[in-house]
Image (cartoon, helix red, strand yellow):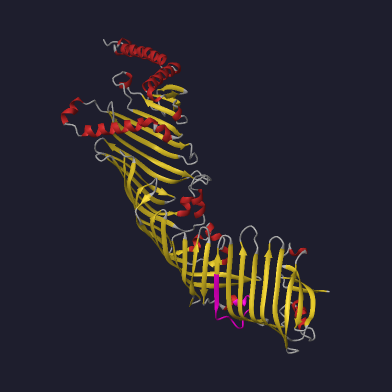
Amino acid sequence: MKRAVVDQPGLKFVFIGLLLSVFIGLIIRSQITESKVNSYVKSVFQQLEKQNEKHSVSLEFDTARLMLSDWGFPLPHLLIKNVKISSRKTECLGNQVFIETLSVPLRWRNILRLKKDLDMARVGSMELRLNNINRCMGLGGELLESVQTHHIDSVNSSRAPSNVDAFAAPTKYFDLYIEKLKIIDKINYNVPVLFQTVAAKLNYSESRILAADIKSQVYLFKAVEQSLYRLRSDFSVSYVEGQQASLKMRGKLIDKPFEINVNLDQQRRKLLLSHKITDWSVKSILGLYSQEQSQKSLIQFFESVTGFAFSNEGRGEYDLKEKKLDFYLLENLSIHSGLSRVDINQVHVTSVKPLIFKPFEVTIKEFELEKIKGIPTFKVIQKSVDNFGLLTAVLKVVDTDDISASGLVNNMSVIFSNQGQRALQKIDNVAFKTNFKDIILENIVFEGQPTMGIVKARLSPLQATAVLSKIKLNEDVYRIFSFNKELPTQLLLKAEISPERAKTKVEIDRLSSDFVEIKNIVINYEADLSESRSYEFEMLLKSFKVNRVATIDASLYTILDQFEEIPPNSPAVFYFENVKARYQRLHPEGVDAQLTANHISTSKNRKNTVHIKSITGGQTEVRPMEARFTLDLSNREGSIKKFDFRADLNQFIFEIIK
């Protein structure tokens, strides 16, 4: 006869196992309460503080819990929230590590004490906050000394005989995963560095790291108005003791590729550096910097640069023992936009602070100066220049204080304007030589006509001299000044400029229009550029003929009609010779203007003397271009006619004062 089901022996074991499971579960639960876990973690942190007492490290956390599952899977782990690691040393105050969540997986071999060392940890969000890191890391040279000692030990160990390995400490492994790591420097707090999805695998012994492999995504230069980062790159670090150590970054900056490589030569104790940049926008790169940084003046200088991109590659070495750059070689450096190019074949840098390099040359080809017309140097003359032209030149750079250049500016055009009319004057070529303290301009060509002469200038303080003859201006320039009949064949310019004074002289052989004909013109201008701000204008004319035309305001002829006994408004020609006019602005007294000339009377066939003198005072001080004058017409016998008149030289309107 068969036994009943209740009499089967297996059911007893199931029942006993169930009771044991409940009993063990209650015991485990009593040991993993939040208070006990917090107490245990606190004791571990205190033990770590004692072990790092030399570095005065402080460890804090908010809560710790033992979790038996993760996302529904039976994965027991220790979860610690808001971990804060900071230094108590005065030199390192403000440096801090903040971990939002730290998860340590628990495995049976750890729980049963078969293995005491952790082999894995996960971090949710982590921030590394830096404050004066150079001072903190350089405490008495302790850190550097320890790094160098460790480096020597690791190299020596890699050369040790193989029989030593039998007594070496066992290799341990540790895996670290960080979802997000943000590094914030207090000085450049608005330029954080973000590492996303950091995976680090470490092999180590009791005394040193044997191998490391770190991979991540790095983000830099976050756009203020957006949540996007302008630099995105793959980041990897690989290290094997005694064999290799390298860092690599490959990514894009504003959608343009770049790469950076750092390799450690462990035998020579040097860092081998290299990089490559392709078509980075100059304006976009400058936009990455804060206006509050030390580069502010450089940024302002290039703010108006448009359309230029640069590319280059380089390689170099850094000596870890001497803590200095051995060299860095920049090659194939180019700045380009369309046909405009600036090329440097090679720059050999041997020191950054102070900056030391070997002499090199910069080749500039058809550089469009129009693209940099917004820089402060050009702003003063922007309204007077229609096209800044194309620059072709060679710069020779010996050191930071010895830079020279020579070349040619082609296809410039400047603007002449008068009463709302504009005319362009083309300057075909200007050859120059400069050391950025002095500049020489020569071989200047106007409208296909080479000039004679040279321009010399010292830039700081500004001093310049110029002597140019055979200057050819086009007809449109003369036309806006109504000189459209007899144009000059000779034009001479002389100038002397210094911080205190400016002196110029212009000689023109002839000019004529429907209104006036002038021969042998000499114009002298001299200005005091100091605080007095006075100037003197003098004009000499050998012959001066005025025609009565309808286009000129009739008020002028009310003055000229006093020289001839003819009916008003009748056709007439007025002749003058040896005209000498002088206009002096006196600060703050007003103006002093005088004119002397010989008037040749056609009605009486005789020569009279004209003398015009300003009457100072009144509104002359406020409006120097509106003045009262006395006119005296005389001959050998005495005064013929004398009267006062008012002249508005801005409007070219005259009025006889009764």
Give me the residue at 50% from left, 54% from top.
Answer: 301
Q: Nearer the viewer, residue 75 or 205?
A: 205
Does the magenta segment cover residue 16?
no
Locate the N terminus by quadrant: top left
Q: Where does the magenta region start and end?
A: 478-494
Q: Residue furthest right?
A: 658
Compared with 231, 593 (above or below) is: below
Q: How many marks?
A: 0
Q: Which residue lies at the image location 52% right of the left edge and 52% below the top edge?
A: 300
Which sits in the foreground, 598 or 134? 598
Q: Residue furthest front?
A: 637
Determine the image quadrant of residue 89: top left
Task: Look at the image and tell me whether residue 339 can be seen.
Answer: no
Q: Position of residue 534 (x, y in %)?
A: 65, 63
Quick check: 431 above or below 145?
Answer: below
Left or right: 368 in relation to 516: left
Q: In x, y percent, where is residue 397?
A: 39, 57
Residue 203, position as x, y percentages in the image: 28, 31
Q: Main secondary structure of the magenta part?
A: loop
In x, y percent, where is residue 624? Answer: 71, 65
Residue 490 colored in magenta in the image = yes
Where 11 falls versus 512 (above or below)?
A: above
Q: Quadrant of residue 572?
A: bottom right
Which quadrant: the C terminus? Answer: bottom right
Say whether residue 140 is left or right of residue 190.
left
